[in-house]
Amino acid sequence: MPEVVITTDRTMMSNHHGKEFLGFVATGPAIGLPEGLWLWISSPKPKILGDGEPLEAPYGLRKVEASLIKNGIDAKIIDPDYLGKYAEETKVLMVGHHDFFAYGPPSNEWWLITGREPINRISFAKLMESEPVRRMKKNGTKIIAGGPAAWQWLYEPDKWKRWGVDTVVDGEAEKVIPSLVRKALKGEELPSYLYVGVKDVPLLDEIPEIVKPSVNGLVEIMRGCPRGCMFCSVTLRPLRHIPIEKVEREILVNVRAGIKRGLLHSEDVLLYGADGVKPKEEPVIKLHEMALKHVEELAWSHASLAAIRYAQEKYKLISKIMEMVKTKQDFLGVEVGLETGGIELAKKIMPAKSAPYPVESWHETVEETFKIMHENDIIPAVTLIIGLPEETEKDLLQTIELLDRLKQYRSLIVPMMFVPMGALKNKEFYRREMMTDLHIEVLYKTYQHSIFWAKDILKKYYLKSLLQFPLRGLLEFFIWYVERKVNSFSEELPILSKEGATT
C-alpha cells in the first residue's frame, strides 16, 4: 500500500469519452437531464487497473506523482471510488482540481445565470465528505490540496476547516512538494498555505516527466506566457519551452499504454520555440511531425488569435499543419481567447494580446483569425469575459459589433463572468446584480452563435461512430433544450429583436 495517495473527484478523474472538451459539461449544473446522466455525459468512469489505479489520470496529478516517485516517495494515483481500500494505511492524501468550488470560468457563469451549483462543485464536496476520506482524517491522515484552483480555498475557510485540509499549495508544485510530503510523513508541522512564487518554480531540468499515462494523452510543451494579460495568472510565471525530446518521451508513455490520442498543452501552442510573440515555423513543424508520428488523433489546448494569424500570414503555417493533421482526422480543436471587443479596454488589460499586430486592429486580427480557422477546419472554443474591471458601454457595444462580424465562422463562443485572477486578483468578482442590458445582449448573441454552430459541428465532425450515437443523441437533446430556453428567455427581453440585434 502506498503511503501517499493522490486523487480528485469524478469530474476530473475521467477521459470524458476521449473528447477533452466534453469535460466542460461538468462546469454547469444538470440542465434538463438527471444529475447522474449529466455526469456520465461529461465524466464517465475511467478504465481501472489493479487496486483502483486509473489507466489515465489528470496531467497535473501525474506530474505530482512523478515528482514524488523521483524523490523516493511511495505515491500512487487512485480513483475516488476505490479510496476505501486505502483508508487505513494512507498517511498523506493529496487532492487536486482545476475548479474546486466552481469559482473559475465557465463554472461561475453557469452558476450565476441558473442560480444552481455546478456539478463539479457538488462532485468535489461529495468526495471530501465521503466515508473513506472522513475515515482517513479520523486515522490521522494529512490532507494536502493544490492545483490551478488552489486560490479558491481562500474563499472557503469553513470547508477548509471542516474537511481537515492541512495544507493548500498554490502554484507549480513539483519543486516544493517532495519536502512538504516528507514533513507530513514524519508528522511535522505543516504550513496551512504555501504559495509558490517565481523564485520557487521548477527550472526545465527540475520538471519531472510523467511515468504513467495522462488523460487523453495530454502533454505539456510550454509553461508561462509572454503576453502579460492582467486577468491571467499564467503570465505571472516564467516562460519555459519543454525540449522536444522530453515531450516525445511523455507522448510515448501514453502510446505504450494504448492511448493513441495526443493533446499538446501550452497557453499558446504556436509560440513553441518562438522568440517573444512571433511564431517560428521550424520548431512548430518539427513538434507536429513528431507528435503525429506517434498518435492517431491530435488537439491543441490553447492558441492565441494573433499567433494563428501571424503564423498563417508569415509562413502559411496553419495550412501546413492542417495538411499533416488531416491525414489522420477531419478537424483540430483548440481553445482561444477573444476576451473583449472593447479596444480601449484591451489597451488597458491585454495590450499584448494582439501582438505583433497593434491593439487598435484587434477586431481585424480576431476576424482574420476566425476566417483562417474556419477555412482550415480548426474548431475553436472561444472565451469571452463579461464584467472586466473598467469595462464601459462602449466596450460592450464594440464587443456586440464584433460578435456580429463573427457569425459566419464555425466556433463555440463561451461567455465567462470576470473572476479576479492574475494582476487583477484584488478586484471584485462579477455578480448577478452587475448585469446590464448590454451584458444580456452579449450573452444572448454568444448563445445564438454557439447553438447554431454546435449543431453544425455535431453533424459534420463530432461523435460519428455507431458506438457514440447514444452520447450524440444526449448532446443533441441538450442543444435543443438550451436553444428552447434561450428563445424563451429572449421573448421576455425588450432590448432584443428576434435576430438578437440591438433595438
Image (cartoon, rainbow, N blue to C red):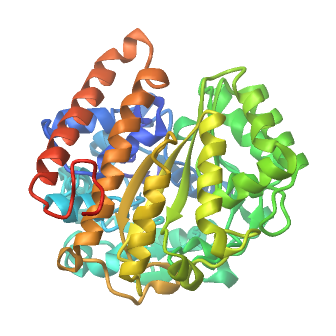
Where in the figure is residue 175, as x and y percent of width and height? 65, 70
Residue sitting nearer the eye, 34 or 63: 34
Residue at 25 percent across and 38 percent down: it is 39
204 sits left or right of 125 in the view: right
Residue 10 seen anywhere in this rendered image of the structure: no
| Relative height, residue 93 to residue 239 (above, below) | above
Residue at (37, 46) in percent of width and height: 449
Give the x, y percent position of residue 10: 32, 44
Locate residue 263: give its quadrant. top right
Q: Residue at x 41, y 37 (%)?
A: 453
Q: Residue at x 43, y 54 (%)?
A: 404
Asked where in the image residue 470 lies, by quadrant, the reply is top left
**In which quadrant is the C terminus drawn?**
bottom left
Which residue occupies the foreground of this view, 77 or 415? 415
Image-based side of 85 in relation to 46, left or right:
left
Q: Determine the residue located farthest toward the top in the rendered image.
A: 466
Instruction: Name the residue furthest front.
Output: 503
